[in-house]
Image (cartoon, rainbow, N blue to C red):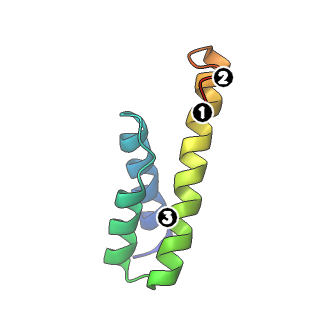
């Protein structure tokens, strides 16, 4: 799988999962398994992507006033 297709798949998964309040680790792992990634690389990459998507969502909710620091 070339880099552009992999990035597009990750972007699509991130958008779909984030739209329902999730970060998408299972989707990232599925794409990486189909692309032939090594298991050690899959773990680290899925964790990093999951943290990035969840962090962006948290910041956006904080800025919009939908959640407060006390609730986190």
Q: Where does the N terminus fall, quadrant-wise?
A: bottom left
Secondary structure found at label 2: loop
Q: Residues within 10 Å of mark 1 (few under 14, many from 20)?
A: some
Extreme residue toward the top, this view: 65
Q: CA distance from mark 3 to mark 2?
A: 28 Å
Question: Where 12 sits versus 9, above or below?
Answer: above
Q: Residues within 10 Å of mark 3 (few under 14, many from 20)?
A: many
Q: Residues within 10 Å of mark 2 (few under 14, many from 20)?
A: few
Q: Residue at x 44, y 57 (%)?
A: 10
Secondary structure found at label 1: helix
Mark 1 and mark 2 lie on one chain; the one further toward the N terminus is: 1
Whole-percent x, y for residue 47 in the image? 54, 62
| Residue holding disc 3 | 46
Secondary structure found at label 3: helix
Q: Is residue 61 left or right of residue 4?
A: right
Whole-percent x, y for residue 21 in the image? 41, 35
Q: Camera-side residue: 39 or 71? A: 71
Q: State which quadrant residue 6 falls in.
A: bottom left
Mark 1 and mark 3 lie on one chain; the one further toward the N terminus is: 3
| Residue holding disc 2 | 70
Whole-percent x, y for residue 65 in the image? 62, 14
Q: CA distance from mark 1 to mark 3?
A: 18 Å
Q: Residue at x 35, y 34 (%)?
A: 20
Question: Where 49 sits versus 21, above or below?
Answer: below
Q: Residue at x 49, y 64 (%)?
A: 46
| Disc 1 to disc 2: CB gap under 8 Å | no
Q: State which quadrant residue 15 falls in.
A: top left
Q: Is residue 57 left or right of residue 32?
A: right
Question: Where 34 sits versus 64, above or below?
Answer: below
Q: Residue at x 43, y 38 (%)?
A: 18
Tell which tag, 3 or 2, sits nearer the viewer: 2
| Residue holding disc 1 | 58
């Amino acid at each position: 799988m070339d880099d552009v297709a992999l990035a597009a798949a990750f972007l699509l998964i991130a958008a779909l999962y984030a739209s329902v309040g999730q970060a998408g680790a299972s989707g990232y792992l599925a794409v990486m398994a189909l692309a032939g990634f090594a298991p050690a690389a899959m773990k680290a990459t899925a964790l990093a992507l999951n943290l990035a998507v969840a962090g962006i969502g948290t910041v956006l909710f904080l800025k919009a006033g939908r959640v407060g620091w006390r609730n986190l």
